[in-house]
Amino acid sequence: MSHPNWKRVVIKVGSALISPNKQGCSSHYLLSIAQFIVRCRANGTQVVLVSSGSVAAGAHLFPDHEKSNIAVKKAMAAAGQTEMIATWDRLFDFPSAQMLLTHADLRDRERYVSIRETIFSLLEHNVLPIVNENDTVTTDKLKVGDNDNLSAMVAAAADADALIICSDIDGLYNKNPHDHDDAELLKEVDTIDASIYAMAGGAAEGGVGTGGMRTKIEAAEKAVSHGIDTYIINGFTELSFNMLLAGKNPGTHFSPYDKPMLENVHWMRHTSNAQGEVIVDGDFDSSLENDSEQLTSSEIVDVKGEFSVGDTILVRKADGTKLVKAKSNYSSCLLNFIANQENDDFASEFEDKTGPIISDQHVANLEKE
Ligand SMILES: Nc1ncnc2c1ncn2[C@@H]1O[C@H](COP(=O)(O)OP(=O)(O)O)[C@@H](O)[C@H]1O
Ligand SMILES: N[C@@H](CCC(=O)OP(=O)(O)O)C(=O)O
């Protein structure tokens, strides 16, 4: 088979490939990845690179006993990032661009749309976008936390056809091969369910990776539901890239959904995160599937957390069943106020004037998780 017919791909490169010895960046493994990127572009495929490695690359500049300190880790990321970008840039004879993102950027619809526009503009002008998480500014609340999930969010934002996750291992095994000699490689995964998650462990203790296979499966789930072919491959060997260009699967391939989610529903489901919760009584469930505008304050049992107009909220039943994620047209404060009115007429008159509680434009059904 000739090279695959991709219009656009996202290639994610793990830390072990950038900084195998935590002594700054090494181009040793990056050469064949760069060559793959060059060949993709020559075939007419647009490429977005998501590169890890800033923390690992900056590690050698700081004393060992300080490396677990969060502020020092951020400093390692800041220092390593320039070296990482410079190393990539040296490998190409076309321009590259640095994009540093956080989850706070991606979960905000306006900023998300802006990120999409920037990616498309760079690609249109033949500039290679190189994305990483902006580790220096993130907190637990603001971060994606791992570049596997980040790469899937970027692949969705870029409307990519394929996501290629280059790791330090051949793909997903039925158990961690570092712990089990009899582990077997899965070549094809058609459905990502609990049995697949059960196979995936975390990153190796003391290694440079974050998240291990677990976050790669999460990433694959995000990507395939957007209709994106996803591969986990061994980035240490050039053979992986030659096989991909020949249309073959060098690692684990995750099949995309036949019917991908709509772009805005996918964003709501997989990129946005809920700022608060609205607890409803059981009757709401069926009406929502027919018409998402039907949530009324009389069905609301409780409002949890603080959210503003336009924030994403989780609507769930009192027993914990998750129903939908949706954009709230009301703040938590106002919703609490009208839901607590003894007189239902007041609330319904208010809603008639102000409009529906959740927007029917941005609703992701969670299929009763
Ligand atoms: N079932 C599994 N199959 C393959 N690797 C696994 C599995 N479970 C856990 N792992 C671990 O995941 C690691 C790859 O993830 P990670 O260390 O985060 O690398 P990267 O830097 O490429 O993201 C493997 O080296 C292995 O230690
Ligand atoms: N943003 C971090 C990468 C975090 C991460 O997910 O690392 P990895 O598991 O090696 O892809 C960095 O640049 O060091």
Image (cartoon, rainbow, N blue to C red):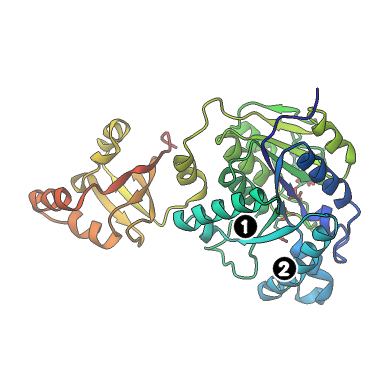
Q: Is residue 278 left or right of residue 18?
A: left
Secondary structure at numbered mark 1: loop
Q: Are marks 1 and 2 in contact (CB under 8 Å)?
A: no
Amino acid residing under circle 1: Gly
Task: Tell me if I can see residue 196 in this picture.
Answer: yes
Which residue, given by chain and number where applicable, does mark 2 sit on? Answer: 77
Q: How many marks?
A: 2
Give the distance between the C-alpha atoms of the residues marked 1 and 2, in whole angstroms. 13 Å
Q: Position of residue 355 (x, y in %)?
A: 21, 49
> Closer to the camera, 274 or 256?
256
Residue at the image point whose x is 62% and y is 51% from the top: 150
Residue at the image point whose x is 85% and y is 62% from the top: 25
Above or below, 79 against 56 in this view is below
Secondary structure at numbered mark 2: helix
Looking at this view, name the residue that lies furthest to the front.
125
Which residue, given by chain and number where applicable, does mark 1 sit on? Answer: 145
Amino acid residing under circle 2: Ala
User: In the image, which is nearer the foreground, mark 1 or mark 2?
Assistant: 2
> Closer to the camera, 307 or 343?
307
Q: Position of residue 285 (x, y in %)?
A: 30, 35
Which quadrant of the structure image shows residue 4?
top right
Q: Position of residue 55 (x, y in %)?
A: 75, 65
Q: Is mark 2 within 8 Å of ligand 2?
A: yes
Q: Is residue 320 left or right of residue 129?
A: left
Looking at this view, name the residue that lies furthest to the right.
28
